[in-house]
Every structure is written in C-alpha cells, then in structure tokens.
C-alpha cells in the first residue's frame, strides 16, 4: 500500500491533521504523521514525534521550547523534518507528502520537500498560497492550494478544502507513472515568449541529433529550476538562449534571477551555448503596478498582467559586464552567440524595443570584458533567425561530443 507522509506542527494543528489523515486513509492509502511542532502534539498521536524531528535537525526539543525563539525553532525543526523525510524516502516508505499550515508550517514542509526528487507528489494547503509562493515552491514541483480560511478547526469550509487535498494527493500518488522512453542526453534550454522561435528551431535540431530538450520559462524560478537540475547531474548541455532574468535582477523587475544565474553550468564544466535573449526588457505586472520612477520609460503592454520596460544603454552596459564576468569563470566548454540584429522579437527594426544604441552598449561591454579564451560568435542576425538558432544547436552538439571524446 502506498504511503503519504503528512508533516506539520501538531502542537497547534493536531485536530486538523487527524482529520486530514483520516481523509487520506479513506482514499486507500497508508499515512505517516510527522510532528514538526516544538511543544509536542495535541489532539493526535504522531508516528514520528517532535523529539525525533528536533534531533534530526541537531537540536533538543525541550531546549527549543524553553528558549522561546520562534525563528530558531522553525529553522531547527525544518532541518529535522528534511532529514526525516529523506530517511523515509530512502526506506521506500514515502510515495507522496502533504502538509497544512500558515507561513511557519508551510516553510517547514517546503524545506522537508527539498529532500525529495522531482516527480514525487508534493502538496501544501496553506494560508499563504494566494500570494507570492516563490519562497515555498522555489525550484520544486510543489502544488500549493489556498486554504481560504485559516487552518484553525474543522468547519464546513476547511473540511471541504482538506478533503479536496486528500483526494488530490491520493490522485497524484495513484496515477500510473508514464512509460519511460529510452534515455537520451538531456539539454536544458532557456526560453521566453519573445525567444520562442529560436528555442523551437534549436530544440528540433537537437532532438534530431539524439537529445531530449527540457525548456525552462525564464520567470525567475525557471532559471533556478534549470540550474538545480544541472547541480543534480541530470544535464548534458545548456542551451542558455534567454537570460532576461538578469535584467530583472539588475533593475528591479518581478522575474529576477537568483544570485548564481549563468554561473552553474560553467562551474560544473557542463558544455554551454549562451545568447542574450530578452535582455532588452524588464518585467512588471499590470501597467498600473510599474514603479513611479519608471513611468516615463519605454513601456510595452504585453498583456493585461505583463508590462515590459526597455532596458537603457547604461543598464545594458552593466549587463554586458556581468555576463562577461560570469562566463569568464566557466571551467567547461562555453560559447557565446551574439545576435547583432536584435535580442528579442520586439527588439528588431520596426518593433517597439528596437534601440541600436542600447544594444551596442551591451555588445561593447561584452567585447571589452569577455576573456579571449571564451569562444564568441558575433552574428548579423536576430536571435530568432532560424540560421542563428541552428548554429547554436549545432555548436552545442559539437562541444558535448568534444568533451565526451576527451573523457573516453
């Protein structure tokens, strides 16, 4: 029988977890109830006690309770929960994991879920699920559902939400695994709407050459997810066409890169082909959410929920310096492809973000700062030109094959 691990702060939510556990069992699944609260379970008997969880985080539960430092306690219990979950998964006793909570309980559960690989069902019912979920989901395949009411008692609203959650985790656990095709080397590709033609063309070519291409939408977490898989040893090569997250990080957009963006492949020695896709833009939400200091800039309403802002020559010069610095640190095969005709579909001549001065500031900074040992291709084409995309795909294949030949 498949087992779902339920992990939560049972010192304040024991009754709610007892109800959740019973609903999961009604779905024909076994459960393991893990207490990540500091004070000890109330209203339910856990299968893994708070004392065991604290010990897994290198702490003493009684000492945490006596100290009265909630932040420190949550951190210790999160570390312990992660250790417990890792052990249960290694023992084959975890086929899915779920949690109920507010910000604290959700953060503990999210940390525990980091111990699990992609594909293991993960569900959090949370009071914070209607806001910014990035601190909880990050690069994980976590499903979050909004609790509507607080996790405080069983009532006609919470009962239905929790019952739905039990059905959801059961469905995820019980769904048959899809057939696994013969394994092919994995390529990680970065894409945005304005670079989709380039990635589509390059992906088709790489698939012809025998690769499987994983495409990551560059939404801030997209780049992080892509590089987490690199760190996990899954990726044979990187087709990093789109680095727009770096512009958001620099200027303050809503899709900002994580601090190590564009460094991981190079530091791991993974062959990479990099381009400058969508560095002409910074992303904001609806037009009325654009910060006041940017209201007079070149703005483009992409849709009702996305407003784009053209990067300036000064911003592009800084981006060029940052990209050069990141690529200069690469230890593996690296090639930069520079599309002199435009870095996105709306940066070409006749489109709203066409700005040759801003583009040249980016290109000039790269010329001045890129280490001569980094291979660079300066191409008179825009990023979505099929010939440009094919050239990137073919060069990445060559870099991978050369590296493999050198190690055999």
Image (spheres, rainbow, N blue to C red):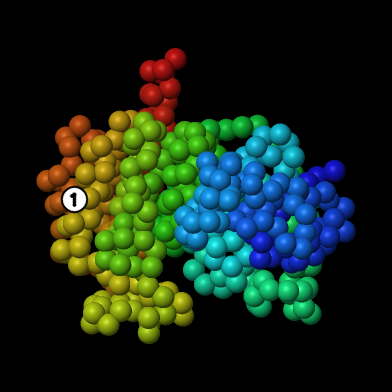
Residue at 37% x, 84% y: name it.
288
Of 216 and 34, the residue lying toward us: 34
Of 120 and 186, the residue lying toward us: 120
- Residue 271 in the figure: left or right of residue 8: left
Q: Residues within 10 Å of mark 1 (few under 14, many from 20)?
A: some
Direction left: furthest residue: 368
Coordinates of residue 266 in the picture (x, y in percent): 33, 36
Q: How many marks?
A: 1
Residue at 49% x, 68% y: name it.
132
Residue 297 appears in the picture as rendered:
yes
- Residue 359 in the figure: left or right of residue 79: left
Quarter of the image for residue 37 reads bottom right
Of 373 and 389, the residue lying toward us: 373
Direction bottom: furthest residue: 288
Disc 1 is placed on an element classified as helix
Residue 165 appears in the picture as rendered:
no
Coordinates of residue 96 in the picture (x, y in percent): 71, 49
Residue at 68% x, 73% y: name it.
152
Direction front: furthest residue: 66
Coordinates of residue 223 in the picture (x, y in percent): 42, 52
Q: Quadrant of the C terminus?
A: top left
- Residue 341 in the figure: left or right of residue 401: left
Direction top: furthest residue: 408
- Name the residue beneath numbered marker 1: 321
Residue at 44% x, 60% y: name it.
219
Against 129, residue 10 (above or below) is above
Against 23, residue 243 (above or below) is above
Q: Quadrant of the N terminus?
A: top right
Quarter of the image for residue 317 reads bottom left
Coordinates of residue 359 in the picture (x, y in percent): 20, 60
């Amino acid at each position: 029988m498949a087992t779902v691990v339920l992990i939560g702060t049972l010192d304040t939510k024991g009754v709610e977890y007892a109800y959740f556990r019973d609903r999961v069992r009604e779905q024909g699944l076994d459960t393991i109830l893990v207490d990540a609260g500091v004070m000890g379970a109330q209203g339910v008997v856990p299968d893994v006690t708070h004392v065991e969880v604290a010990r897994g985080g290198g702490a003493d539960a009684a000492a945490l309770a006596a100290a009265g430092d909630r932040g420190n306690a949550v951190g210790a219990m999160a570390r312990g929960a992660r250790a417990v979950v890792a052990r249960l998964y290694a023992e084959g006793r975890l086929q899915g994991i779920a949690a109920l909570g507010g910000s604290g309980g959700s953060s503990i559960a999210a940390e525990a879920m980091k111990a699990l690989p992609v594909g293991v069902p993960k569900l959090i019912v949370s009071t914070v699920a209607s806001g910014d979920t990035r601190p909880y989901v990050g690069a994980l395949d976590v499903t979050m559902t909004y609790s509507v009411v607080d996790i405080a008692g069983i009532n006609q609203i919470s009962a239905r939400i929790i019952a739905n959650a039990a059905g959801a985790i059961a469905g995820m656990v019980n769904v048959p695994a899809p057939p696994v095709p013969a394994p092919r080397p994995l390529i990680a590709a970065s894409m945005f709407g304005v670079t989709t033609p380039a990635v589509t063309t390059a992906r088709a070519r790489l698939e012809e050459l025998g690769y499987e291409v994983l495409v990551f939408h560059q939404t801030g977490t997209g780049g992080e997810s892509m590089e987490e898989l690199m760190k996990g040893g899954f990726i044979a090569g990187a087709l990093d066409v789109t680095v727009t997250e770096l512009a958001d990080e620099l200027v303050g957009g809503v899709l900002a890169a994580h601090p190590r963006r564009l460094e991981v492949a190079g530091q791991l020695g993974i062959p990479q082909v990099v381009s400058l896709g969508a560095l002409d833009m910074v992303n904001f939400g609806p037009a009325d959410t654009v910060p006041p200091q940017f209201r007079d800039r070149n703005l483009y309403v992409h849709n009702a929920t996305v407003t784009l802002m053209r990067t300036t020559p000064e911003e592009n010069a800084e981006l060029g310096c940052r990209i050069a610095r990141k690529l200069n640190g690469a230890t593996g095969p690296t090639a930069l492809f520079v599309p002199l005709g435009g870095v996105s579909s709306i940066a070409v001549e006749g489109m709203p973000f066409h700005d040759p001065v801003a583009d040249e500031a980016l290109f000039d900074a790269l010329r001045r700062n890129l280490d001569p040992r980094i291979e660079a291709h300066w191409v008179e084409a825009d990023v979505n030109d099929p010939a440009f995309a094919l050239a990137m795909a073919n060069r990445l294949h060559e870099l991978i094959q050369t590296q493999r030949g050198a190690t055999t």
